[in-house]
Image (spheres, rainbow, N blue to C red):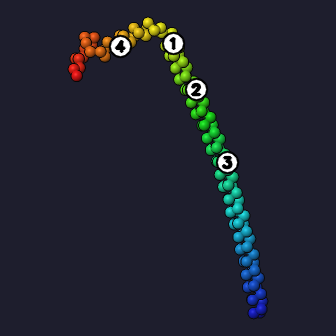
Amino acid sequence: MERDIIGSVIEVEEEIRKKLEAEEKKAREWLEQVRNDAEQEIKREETSIQQDFAETIQNEKAAAEKEASETLKGVKDKAGRLDVLTDTVLNEIISRHIIMILPGEGHDSPDVKS
């Protein structure tokens, strides 16, 4: 009878060991699946961030090129207007402004005495 009890205990212990091993295997498999899922999610996020970054760079570059083009056009327009001014017209403009800075009666501020 004692042998039967010992045999039963051994059988129960063996059954418990097998169940523990099976649970450990399931836990390892679950952990591996969670790890794989996390790695895939990280890769998807990384790809998305890289695409967003590339798109942002492209948009900013296009905006900068447009702004530079508009600025250049404005400068060229101003230069074109200045090119058509003759020396006579420029002399008249300078003469009007130089009176304002020369001492004398051409302005409202008092003359500077040195």
Say which of marks 3 and 4 sits in front.
4
Residue 97: which numbered mark, if any?
4
Q: Which residue is mark 2?
A: 66
Q: Which residue is mark 1?
A: 83
Disc 2, SS: helix
Say which of marks 3 and 1 sits in front.
1
Disc 4, SS: helix
Spatial distance from mark 3 to mark 4, Cα to Cα?
A: 66 Å
Disc 1 crowd rating (10 Å Cα; few below 14, some 14-19, many 20+) is: few
Judge whether 13 appears above or below 52 on screen.
below
Q: Amino acid at mark 1?
A: Asp
| Dot placed on the residue nearer the N-terminal end, 2 or 4 | 2
Q: Which residue is mark 3?
A: 44
Q: Is residue 97 left or right of residue 82?
A: left
Disc 3 crowd rating (10 Å Cα; few below 14, some 14-19, many 20+) is: few
Q: Nearer the viewer, residue 86 or 21?
A: 86
Q: Amino acid at mark 2?
A: Lys
Spatial distance from mark 3 to mark 1, Cα to Cα?
A: 58 Å
| Dot placed on the residue nearer the N-terminal end, 3 or 4 | 3
Spatial distance from mark 2 to mark 4, Cα to Cα?
A: 36 Å
Spatial distance from mark 2 to mark 1, Cα to Cα?
A: 25 Å
Judge whether 56 appears above or below 14 on screen.
above
Query: In which quarter of the view is residue 107 placed?
Result: top left
Spatial distance from mark 4 to mark 1, Cα to Cα?
A: 20 Å
Say which of marks 2 and 4 sits in front.
4
Say which of marks 2 and 1 sits in front.
1
Q: Is residue 49 left or right of residue 95?
A: right
Q: Is residue 36 left or right of residue 111?
A: right
Q: Position of residue 45 (x, y in %)?
A: 64, 47
Say how many tags the image has: 4
Q: Are marks 4 and 1 in contact (CB under 8 Å)?
A: no
